[in-house]
Image (spheres, rainbow, N blue to C red):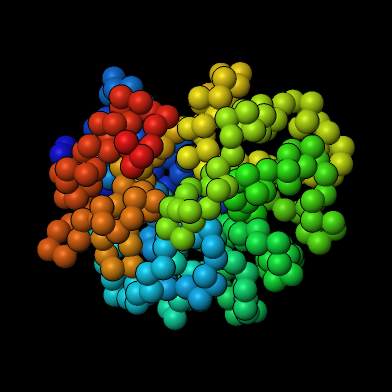
Amino acid sequence: MPDEKQYVITSSVEPRIKKVETDRYKITFNMATGREELEGINGHPDPFSLYYPSLMDIGIMGHCSNRCEFCYQGDDQKPNMSLENFKRIVDESKEYVNQIALGGRGSPNEHENFKEIVEYCIKNDIIPNYTTSGLNLTDEQIEISKMCGAVAVSDYEQDYTYSAINRFINAGIKTNIHFLLSKKTFLKAIGILLGDDMWAGRVNTEKLNAIVFLLFKPQGRAKNLDWIINTDGLKAFCHGIFDKKLAVLRLTRKMNFKLGMDSCLVNKVKKSGVHLTRREEESMDTCEGARMSMYISPDMRMIPCSFGGSEYGIPLEGKTIKEVWNNSDIFKKFREQLLKDPACCPFEL
């Protein structure tokens, strides 16, 4: 692997800009807004994959008491990631990684070292983000969350869901809703695209940052659920999310939040036949697993994507993250499959 230049923080005041530069690409990351720009340099095109991920999904939670029927993580109940192991990951990665998504089985804000984990990210110029159910959310957890780039609350349609969303918003935290798109939630999703207040005033939609649609995956506890949207329904959603008239309608109804999608849903959009402008096409990347991002499980196994399951994981004991990223067969094969078909899911092949 070629020599890489150390990252540089160009300013000690806002906005702080972090730069990572190698022999063939440069990454510029605005630590205040989360905007990341990647470009090829020295005559190289924009890279298909990086020498080291710029985003890491770290499963700090090993267990969860919610027992949601649609949880893709399954029924495993294991210890949480230790603070020592988390610090090891950050120490190895701080020169290359811009953002860490805190995850795993359960709400990261319930980790026994939540404060120390968030502080260690900030200390090492990495922006932490996380998703929570909002259940049993405390004032202390909200205060700690002010150090994060953004917080997402999963829409479980419960009172604690809406309470958590509004408490984060009122605390001045960039707040998103994670919305699981499935056959069961399809009509509500279409209502959102139409600009209807699907929360009946229980969410401050004027100050909500975004709704991020996540594609339902039938695995883990959800493997037997008949929730997969049919092809026609998925096409209707994909066309609706890019319909300019609907975008105007949402604004007139004071639904000012942005709309986003996870990479799995972007894959479906790419195959739906929806017309994308050049700007939309350029901004909608497909699966980033093993290319720009990856997952580390609570028991320190490294996987291209959290949906792969621990059986695909490479234990990090005795290995560096960089070694596994660049040399392990699973990461190499994952990249090869995405190079052949960028809109595929290598774990489904």
Q: Is residue 234 left or right of residue 302?
A: right
Q: Residue at x 30, y 24 (%)?
A: 340
> In the displayed structure, would residue 22 be above or below residue 304?
above
The residue furthest right is: 252
> In the displayed structure, would residue 196 be above or below residue 266?
below
Q: 238 or 249, which is in the foreground?
A: 238
Q: Is residue 251 left or right of residue 238?
A: right
Q: Residue at x 35, y 77 (%)?
A: 79
Q: 8 or 205, which is in the foreground?
A: 205
Residue 331 in the image: state x and y as whole percent.
24, 43
Q: Is residue 62 visible?
A: no
Q: Is residue 312 left or right of residue 176?
A: left
Residue 265 in the image: state x and y as whole percent.
53, 38
Residue 309 in the image: state x and y as whole percent.
33, 55
Q: Is residue 169 left or right of residue 217?
A: right
Q: 267 or 109, which is in the foreground?
A: 267
The residue furthest left is: 318
Q: Residue at x 15, y 39 (%)?
A: 1
Q: Residue at x 70, y 71 (%)?
A: 160
Q: Is residue 186 visible?
A: yes
> In the displayed structure, would residue 264 be above or below residue 314?
above
Q: Quadrant of residue 49?
A: top left
Q: Total of numbered circles in the picture?
A: 0
Residue 91 in the image: state x and y as whole percent.
28, 63
Quarter of the image where the C terminus is located: top left
